[in-house]
């Protein structure tokens, strides 16, 4: 054993050549680029496969690093001079090989002054060879590990530099062990290895002879066949060693003349006893029949124990094993026309644009890394391109490209009809956007009709994407509000009283159906009007609105009181019961971040409880509320039940709050305005009010968390950047444990650099414009103050340059102290505020998290359940998320504490905000 040579002062910059391929190699490269004493002088990787470039090549090109793509380094075991010459041209002092499938000549390995290091996914000398991870599982090892070694002229035989290991769990598969350990820890360990080399502390430990193994390459199909003449545990280990790629091969015997090769996935040892209603399936090499049952496919090992298979791949189609005989009855389409085959190429282009890889018939949408927003994008692009009524469910039913294309062809052959919607007269404009022409009302909606505002006053509605005036809408006055209140009052005591609770639910369901039929129109309006990214508007803004109406429709005929046992005055008897009754006319004032969703969260509960209402939507984006009003007429709501009044807050909003016939006020907005609303409610007529106000929600990320998940949640959930940061529930303050702080920040910044900012109607856009100019200016001032107070601005903090529209760069602050303005006040924008804490002092970080006048939401990421539950117990917030963020649902109550307001939206508790309890006592 000896140490490598030390990097002298004259060589204080390490010149590294990256040799290999894959995202793993790209991440190692980017990690090394962060080191000030490392320069990546060249990247050597494999050629493109068709139009698909390897991830390492893409990363190198992004950073303008010299890039070389060699099909091979040698020809007939002799190095190719031209290749060697190009390699030598970069002048590397160290070769780093994170993952390399090519045979690299010995003269290249030895060329740098400091040699070469290579990553291998086992503790050498055990499991030498290309399929080491799989063999770790197949051989039933109790630990999984990796080695970083100095390659020599043998196959994985060079001296060891360092190793890492972890326990294997019974639930581990090839996929899980790679994702949870080999990949993340491997990237970090490669960085550690390079650091050791630069310091001269890297070891060279000869591999022992004892325990050395070299197993077959499982990329060769002949080595993928499952040997069924062994114990159940050996069968199980083999299947999980090839899960999820390429899958364990087996042969189903249909008859003497007909056999079918399949692949098994999702195996586990089975001990639940005999199965019911199983059907036998003959598998080649298995002495007894396997059994298809409701839980999968049971295979008996030679030891009498059983393995259960959950999924089977037939050709390119993945099915549940329990559906084997059902699937066998279904025949795929084979007689495609030339036009349909042309559409297949179009469909493949859509998939390729989303997945960023070449598309084969066997490509699995989710296995390729697609998420929920990718599903929305795929469905929308397919509908736009082929004019078919596809929904998200189609992707989940057919995630493999070939299956999905079959569904598309069936839909095209069946055709789709449009049941034309009934018309309602109004003044408005035609919105031409998103390949649509949408008629949008621009008048007030009072008593079932669209009418002009008093004196025909209007508001300019500005498109935040291009800063152009989109249209003008009517601007309600106090007199207009009074007309709407009168209409709602008359309806409450008139026609609405005649509608039974069950009929009320049916009207709400019909409205939800209409919203779903027009969801693309509504999402397009929302996107243009408020700047919401279209795919998000479709999935969340509109999708959750529809869910809210359907959820509360189910409550309409289930609102009931109680009977209460009381002490009677003998000899008489007494019956005491309560009634839950609607309050009457309700006023709703909603914000601009989720225009239709905020309307729906409040109004659906309000209507389900039996009230009538008027709503003052946000001044800057009222168009979805007006389009919604049109749909309420089509659904059959009586005039006056729902009224919509665009206008400004000081006049129209204040008139709603002050009106003496409004008996309940539901408000969502800032804390400052909420205080004035509460005061006005008291002064006017002591009306009941519920307030969902500002937030500065703390999110604590402990070092023992699933860091990959935490970073993903930061990126995808409304912790900071979701919906452009315009979220009351956004994690306004992140507390990250010091041990993972730098790595967390690095990953966040990496994701931000690849975020697509632009036109919200573009399906690939992840970040659209802020809602309006005043808010954009506020965010700029907010960031300026953060810098002035000493916080470190790592990213963003300014308006996007060279872009028309109210685009603000996603922003990250670190080194934020508790007394800083940005640590105390809500930004309501895409600004991440990060503070460190020491993991030994949990009590202090809890105190810091509670050191705010807000109490809307909170979150914690940790694998320690005691720590998580302690957080949930001590945090002063209306919503607590553990190892997730913004997992909201229409059935779960939502609302805050302290100066984040009181009262609840959503869930059964929301109904209580729009009900009054009457106690009735009868003596007999």
Image (cartoon, rainbow, N blue to C red):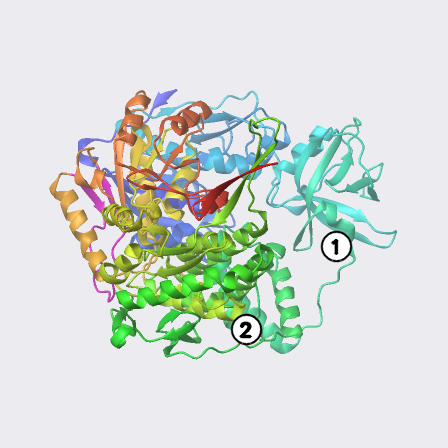
Q: Which residue is mark 2?
A: 387
587 and 516: which one is in front? 587
Quarter-of-image position of residue 417: bottom right
Crowding at label 2, few (<14), some or many (≥20) Cα neighbours within 10 Å?
Answer: some
816 and 596: which one is in front? 596
Quarter-of-image position of residue 800: bottom left
The relative height of residue 655 versus residue 154 in the rendered view (above or below) is below
Magenta segment: does it hold 733?
A: no
Quarter-of-image position of residue 1: top left
Image location (x, y in percent) of residue 585: 40, 56
The magenta segment: 791-814
Image location (x, y in percent) of residue 916: 45, 45
Kindly state the secondary structure of the residue where label 1 is placed: helix
- The residue located at (71%, 68%) in the rendering is 334
Magenta segment: does it hold 799?
A: yes
666 and 354: which one is in front? 666
Separation of marks 2 and 1 at Cα, in angstroms: 28 Å
Kindly state the secondary structure of the residue where label 2 is placed: loop
Q: Which residue is mark 1?
A: 327
């Amino acid at each position: 054993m000896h140490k490598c040579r030390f990097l002298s002062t004259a060589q204080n910059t390490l010149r590294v050549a990256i040799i290999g391929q894959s995202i793993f190699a790209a991440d190692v490269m980017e990690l090394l680029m962060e080191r000030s004493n490392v320069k990546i002088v060249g990247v050597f990787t494999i050629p493109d496969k068709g139009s698909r470039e390897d991830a390492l090549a893409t990363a190198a090109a992004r950073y303008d690093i010299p890039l070389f793509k060699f099909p091979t380094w040698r020809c007939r075991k002799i190095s190719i001079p031209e290749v060697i010459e190009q390699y030598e041209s970069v002048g590397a002092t160290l070769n780093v090989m994170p993952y390399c499938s090519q045979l690299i000549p010995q003269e290249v390995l030895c060329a740098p002054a400091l040699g070469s290091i290579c990553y291998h996914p086992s503790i050498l000398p055990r499991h030498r060879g290309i399929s080491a991870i799989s063999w770790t599982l197949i051989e039933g090892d109790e630990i999984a590990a990796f080695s970083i070694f100095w390659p020599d002229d043998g196959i994985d035989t060079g001296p060891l530099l360092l190793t890492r290991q972890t326990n294997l769990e019974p639930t581990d598969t090839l996929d899980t062990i790679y994702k949870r350990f080999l990949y993340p820890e491997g990237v970090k360990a490669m960085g550690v290895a390079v650091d050791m080399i630069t310091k001269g502390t890297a070891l060279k430990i000869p591999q022992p002879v004892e325990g050395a193994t070299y197993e077959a390459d499982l990329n060769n199909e002949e080595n993928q066949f499952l040997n069924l003449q062994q114990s159940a545990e050996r069968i199980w280990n083999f299947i999980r060693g090839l899960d999820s790629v390429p899958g364990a091969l087996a042969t189903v015997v249909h008859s003497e003349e007909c056999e079918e090769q399949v692949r098994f996935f999702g195996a586990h040892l089975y001990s639940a006893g005999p199965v019911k209603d199983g059907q036998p399936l003959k598998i080649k090499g298995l002495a007894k029949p396997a059994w298809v049952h409701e839980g999968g496919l049971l295979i008996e090992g030679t030891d009498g124990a059983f393995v259960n298979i959950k999924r089977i791949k037939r050709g390119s189609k993945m099915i549940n094993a329990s559906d084997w005989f059902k699937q066998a009855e279904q025949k795929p389409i084979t007689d495609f026309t030339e036009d349909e085959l042309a559409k297949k190429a179009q469909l493949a282009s859509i998939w390729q644009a989303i997945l960023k890889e070449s598309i084969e018939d066997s490509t699995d949408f989710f296995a390729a890394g697609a998420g929920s927003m990718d599903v929305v994008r795929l469905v929308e692009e397919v509908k736009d391109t082929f004019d078919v009524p596809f929904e998200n469910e189609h992707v989940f039913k057919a995630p493999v490209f070939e299956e999905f294309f079959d569904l598309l062809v069936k839909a095209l052959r069946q055709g789709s009809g449009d049941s034309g919607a009934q018309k309602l007269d109004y003044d408005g404009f035609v919105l031409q956007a998103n390949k649509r022409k949408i008629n949008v009302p621009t008048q007030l909606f009072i008593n079932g009709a669209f009418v002009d505002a008093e004196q025909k006053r209007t508001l300019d509605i500005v498109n935040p994407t291009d800063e152009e005036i989109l249209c003008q809408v009517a601007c309600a006055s106090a007199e207009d509000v009074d007309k709407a209140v009168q209409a709602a009052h008359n309806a409450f005591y008139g026609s609405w009283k005649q509608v039974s609770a069950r009929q009320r639910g049916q009207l709400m369901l019909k409205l939800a159906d209409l919203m779903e039929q027009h969801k693309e129109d509504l999402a397009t309006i929302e996107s243009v009007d408020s700047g919401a990214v279209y795919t998000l508007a479709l999935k969340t803004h509109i999708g959750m609105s529809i869910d809210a109406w359907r959820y509360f429709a189910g409550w309409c005929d289930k609102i009931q009181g109680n009977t209460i046992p009381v002490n009677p005055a003998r000899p008489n008897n007494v019956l005491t019961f309560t009634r839950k009754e609607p309050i009457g006319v309700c006023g709703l004032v909603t914000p601009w971040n989720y225009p239709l969703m905020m309307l729906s969260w409040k109004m659906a509960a309000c209507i389900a409880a039996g009230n009538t209402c008027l709503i003052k939507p946000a001044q800057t984006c009222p168009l979805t509320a007006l389009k919604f009003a049109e749909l309420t007429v089509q659904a059959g709501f009586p005039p006056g039940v729902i009224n919509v009044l665009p206008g400004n807050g000081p006049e129209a909003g204040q008139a709603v709050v002050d009106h003496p016939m409004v008996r309940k006020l539901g408000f969502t907005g800032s804390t400052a305005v909420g205080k004035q609303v509460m005061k006005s409610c008291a002064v006017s007529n002591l009306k009941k009010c519920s307030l969902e106000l500002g937030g500065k929600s703390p999110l604590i990320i402990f070092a023992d968390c699933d860091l990959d998940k935490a970073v993903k949640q930061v990126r995808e959930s409304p912790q900071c950047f979701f919906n452009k940061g315009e979220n009351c529930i956004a994690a306004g303050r992140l507390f990250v444990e010091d041990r993972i702080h730098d790595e967390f920040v690095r990953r966040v910044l990496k994701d931000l650099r690849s975020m697509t900012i632009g036109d919200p109607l573009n399906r690939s856009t992840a970040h659209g414009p802020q809602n309006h100019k005043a808010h954009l200016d506020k965010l700029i001032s907010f960031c300026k103050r953060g810098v002035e107070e000493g916080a470190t601005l790592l990213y963003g903090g300014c308006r996007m340059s060279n872009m028309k529209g109210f685009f603000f760069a996603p922003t990250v602050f670190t080194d934020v102290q508790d007394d800083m303005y940005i640590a105390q006040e809500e930004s309501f924008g895409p600004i991440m505020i990060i503070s460190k804490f020491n993991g030994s002092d949990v009590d202090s970080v809890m105190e810091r998290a509670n050191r705010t006048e807000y109490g809307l939401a909170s979150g914690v990421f940790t694998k320690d359940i005691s720590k998580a539950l302690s957080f949930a117990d001590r945090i002063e917030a209306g919503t607590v998320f553990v190892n997730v963020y913004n997992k909201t649902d229409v059935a779960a109550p939502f609302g805050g504490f302290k100066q984040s307001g009181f009262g609840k939206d959503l869930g059964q508790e929301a109904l209580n905000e729009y009900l009054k309890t009457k106690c009735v006592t009868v003596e007999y």
